[in-house]
């Protein structure tokens, strides 16, 4: 895909974004009362933003023009943030983390795959060297301690030296076995020869009918060839109907290989253009300084002198020159013509006169307070009226997107770029930027000169001297500032740095050695295989709450975990998610998702599981030190993920006697404090995983974890895709002999972990080699499954029941109950009370 194509794609995306922003601004003002309409509107906006996000991500990744990329990046971050805001709105409205868009997708003619949240490639691209460097350091530390995992694996396959006699014996055994096999083959051939001769002697008496023999051979051959033809026709029909993939479907085509080469070349040119742009920023500024600097200085001095004279003519005195803190002469001359400056002077004079009159009438103005109170009451009443209808909450990201969109319209929409075929930087744009910078730098110098000139003028013309009062005022001002500094110092004492004397590198090494900072497995979010839930909305319309699909879970991980951790601007302004809980049965991929968050964002992984911190940093002070070091390193080397595995142990209702020595509840009181310490600019996410959330004390558990995601066992569609992909990934070849549909049906209740275990058990190296003449069958996998226990319906129900007790679950349940049921309950209570009263009377 050429540069022109990506430019075209960008222009089209900007147009759709522009129309969407117009719609958004319309709906922001309106208040709605129909909940179905609101949820449909939010879902439509959400889906459209996802499409814009997908396109912009591709464009930002592939466009090579450095100035365009700066703008696209700004809009891309805005779109990401808006997506998270809309998601938050939808969650608050529908009181559920999972949303189903099948009906809207149908209206918009979109495939469910287009709902996938893409993970921007710049998350890793822009800090690839940092991540690689950190991985090297981590691997080195682990190797020094002897915890280097790859070495342990390689030790298994190291060859041992054998004595010569044993080696000779082994060769002799192998050779004798080979000779024995050859002798057996030879004997078999002799036996067959004798057998044939015997048969010929017996049949020799009978006359062989040649025609009958030929007919027999023809029958067999015709039957065989027709069978082959029918088989081929059937395969062609299945391909035509779209039931089977066409031949060479899974093979990578030459065009894809070519496209990958082009994109890698484009990435190289991107880097070159970025470097050229950075150099140009410096060189163009220096050139401007030499050529235009003196003219700018003269113009500014003339302007300020003219202002002195105008002020003197109009007011009779020279003006006061603004301080450096106020901004110097920029306050007076910011985008103003000399005429506007003179008008300002006159207006200031009139204001001063008015102020003098106001000071005299101060006492008369005091009894105006009741009016304010009335206004406040009026405002409250208005708010109540507004609250009746739903209004979209104000967005932080809409202004940035609108600003970016306006820059696009003014600069790039109709820009003629025929001269810039290689898409390098535009020098004129840099000149415009740098002129402003240069002017502000020169203005500071000019201000200093002109202040002196104004003093000289005052001395010469008005014979004024500087009074010491002003100096006193300034001193007073300074004193106030000193006081502020003192306050900051006090705050600093509260958050005492326990390791002020140590470097981050030494703390990092200590955490690795203690096993608190671990190496994340290289797993992408796309490796979390699953299928969409195609009937979500339909089931909800019949008031059946569907179980979320694996891809719904994947989407939530991308929204709550990966996007905010990857982009600092999104994390600072979007609805803040500090902690996530992944709850689900064993083997559904909770830990894999934690590792995927780290892989996709290049985050550090801290393991604060109860079992991992047992016996480390003992005592109260030790615990405080441990958390301080973890938070400090996580902050310095952000993004970071703090993982607490089997997190229910930290919040046990009752600690089992076997685990008392481990002190699993050490972190219970500390976790809320850590959450309070985390600010929007700290890209740190606390992720808990649990198989038994019902063992935890619910209230404190839900206080720590803002977002609770139930990870379900895979449904039929997900199991079908899962079996297929995992068999292929482990070297299996799928043929018609292997009934995957049957496998998916039988394994209802089994998790991804079970499937992986079974496939790895069956597909040994020997079995993979045998596939050419002995294709895989479903029976082979079923035999291994019999020894495993699935996730039973009761266990899934217990997870659902537990979720119904969480804050979000309670709200959802109340919303589903609706107002009618509450009214009926009230009626029932009233009847009971009446009955009781009547009994008492009797």
Image: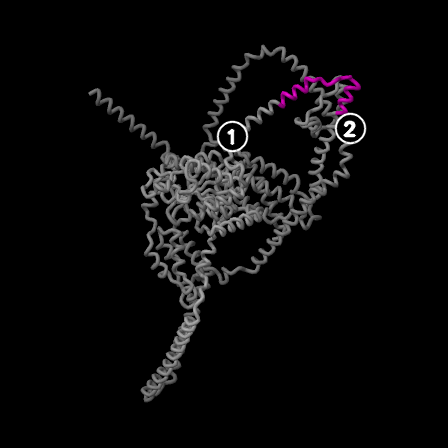
| Quarter of the figure that contains the C terminus | top left
**Magenta span covers which residues?**
452-478
What residue do we see at 78% from left, 21% from top? 457
What residue do we see at 55% from left, 26% from top? 487
- Residue farthest toward the left in the current orientation of the protein: 842
Residue ID for mark 2: 302
The percent position of residue 677, horizontal first and vertical second, equals: 48, 34
Disc 2 element: helix
| 102 or 370, nearer to the observer | 370
| Majority secondary structure in the magenta region | helix
The percent position of residue 235, horizontal first and vertical second, equals: 44, 64
Left of 311 or right of it: where is 671?
A: left
The percent position of residue 741, horizontal first and vertical second, equals: 39, 57
| 471 or 791, nearer to the observer | 471
Residue 363 sits in which quadrant?
top right
Residue ID for mark 1: 493
- Residue farthest toward the right in the current orientation of the protein: 460
Q: Is residue 394 above or below residue 235?
A: above
The percent position of residue 545, horizontal first and vertical second, equals: 38, 42
**Residue count near mark 1 (Cα–Cα under 10 Å), binned few <14, some 14–19, many ≥20:** few
């Amino acid at each position: 895909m050429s540069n022109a194509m990506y430019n075209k794609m960008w222009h089209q995306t900007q147009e759709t974004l522009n129309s969407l922003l117009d719609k958004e601004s319309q709906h922001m003002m309106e208040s709605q009362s129909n909940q179905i309409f609101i949820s449909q509107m939010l879902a439509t906006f959400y889906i459209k933003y996802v499409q814009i996000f997908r396109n912009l991500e591709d464009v930002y990744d592939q466009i090579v023009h450095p100035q365009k990329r700066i703008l696209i990046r700004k809009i891309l971050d805005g779109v990401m943030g808006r997506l998270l805001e809309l998601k938050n709105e939808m969650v608050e409205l529908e009181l559920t983390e999972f949303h189903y868009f099948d009906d809207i997708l149908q209206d918009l003619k979109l495939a469910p795959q287009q709902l996938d949240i893409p993970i921007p490639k710049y998350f890793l691209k822009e800090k690839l060297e940092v991540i690689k460097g950190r991985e090297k350091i981590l691997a080195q530390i682990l190797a020094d301690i002897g915890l280097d995992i790859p070495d342990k694996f390689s030790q298994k396959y190291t060859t041992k030296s054998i004595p010569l006699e044993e080696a000779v014996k082994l060769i002799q055994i192998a050779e004798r076995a080979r000779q024995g096999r050859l002798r057996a083959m030879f004997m078999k051939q002799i036996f067959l020869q004798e057998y044939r001769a015997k048969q010929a002697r017996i049949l020799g008496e009978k006359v062989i009918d040649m025609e009958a023999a030929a007919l027999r051979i023809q029958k067999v051959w015709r039957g065989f060839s027709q069978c082959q033809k029918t088989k081929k026709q059937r395969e062609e029909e299945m391909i035509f109907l779209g039931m089977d993939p066409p031949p060479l479907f899974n093979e990578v085509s030459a065009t894809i290989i070519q496209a990958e080469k082009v994109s890698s070349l484009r990435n190289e040119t991107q880097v070159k253009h970025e470097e050229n742009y950075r150099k140009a920023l410096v060189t163009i500024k220096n050139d401007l300084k030499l050529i235009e600097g003196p003219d700018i200085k003269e113009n500014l001095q003339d302007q300020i002198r003219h202002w002195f004279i105008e002020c003197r003519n109009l007011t009779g005195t020279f003006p006061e020159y603004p301080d450096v803190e106020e901004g110097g002469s920029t306050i007076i001359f910011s985008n103003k013509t000399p005429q506007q400056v003179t008008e300002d002077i006159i207006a200031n004079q009139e204001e001063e006169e008015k102020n003098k009159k106001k000071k005299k009438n101060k006492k008369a103005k005091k009894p105006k307070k009741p009016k304010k109170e009335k206004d406040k009451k009026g405002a409250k009443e208005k708010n109540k009226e507004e609250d009746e209808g739903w209004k979209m909450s104000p967005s932080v990201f809409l202004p940035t997107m609108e600003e970016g969109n306006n820059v696009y319209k003014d600069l790039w929409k109709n820009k003629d770029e025929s001269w810039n075929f290689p898409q390098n930087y535009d020098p004129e744009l840099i000149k415009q930027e740098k002129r402003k910078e240069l002017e502000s730098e020169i203005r500071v110098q000019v201000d200093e000169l002109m202040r002196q000139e104004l003093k000289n003028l005052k001395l010469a013309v008005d014979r004024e001297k500087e009074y010491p009062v002003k100096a006193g005022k300034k001193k007073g001002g300074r004193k106030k500032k000193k006081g502020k500094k003192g306050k900051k110092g006090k705050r600093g004492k509260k958050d005492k740095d326990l390791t002020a004397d140590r470097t981050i590198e030494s703390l990092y090494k200590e955490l690795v050695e203690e096993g608190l900072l671990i190496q994340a497995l290289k797993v992408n979010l796309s490796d979390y295989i699953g299928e969409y839930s195609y009937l979500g909305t339909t089931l909800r319309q019949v008031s059946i709450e569907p179980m979320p699909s694996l891809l719904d879970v994947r989407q939530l991980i991308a929204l709550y975990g990966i996007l905010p951790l990857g982009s600092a601007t999104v994390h600072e302004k979007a609805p803040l998610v500090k902690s996530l809980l992944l709850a689900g049965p064993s083997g559904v991929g909770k830990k894999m998702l934690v590792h995927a968050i780290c892989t996709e964002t290049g985050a550090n992984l801290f393991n604060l599981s109860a079992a991992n911190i047992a016996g480390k940093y003992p005592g109260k002070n030790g615990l405080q030190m441990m958390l301080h070091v973890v938070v400090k390193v996580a902050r310095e080397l952000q993004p970071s993920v703090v993982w607490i595995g089997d997190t229910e142990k930290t919040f046990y209702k009752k600690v089992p006697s076997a685990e008392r020595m481990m002190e699993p509840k050490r972190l219970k009181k500390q976790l809320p404090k850590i959450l309070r310490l985390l600010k929007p600019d700290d890209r740190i996410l606390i992720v808990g995983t649990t198989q038994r959330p019902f063992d935890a004390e619910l209230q404190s558990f839900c206080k720590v974890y803002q977002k609770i995601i139930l990870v379900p066992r895979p449904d039929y569609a997900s199991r079908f895709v899962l079996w297929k992909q995992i068999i292929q990934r482990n070297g299996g070849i799928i043929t018609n002999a292997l009934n995957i549909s049957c496998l998916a049906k039988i394994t209802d209740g089994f998790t991804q972990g079970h499937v992986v275990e079974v496939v790895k058990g069956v597909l040994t190296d020997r079995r993979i080699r045998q596939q050419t003449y002995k294709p895989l069958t479903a029976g082979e996998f079923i035999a291994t499954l019999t020894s495993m226990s699935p996730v039973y319906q009761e266990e899934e129900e217990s997870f659902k029941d537990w979720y119904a007790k969480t804050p979000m679950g309670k709200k959802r349940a109340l919303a589903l109950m609706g107002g009618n049921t509450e009214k009926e309950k009230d009626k029932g209570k009233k009847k009971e009370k009446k009955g009781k009263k009547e009994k008492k009377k009797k």
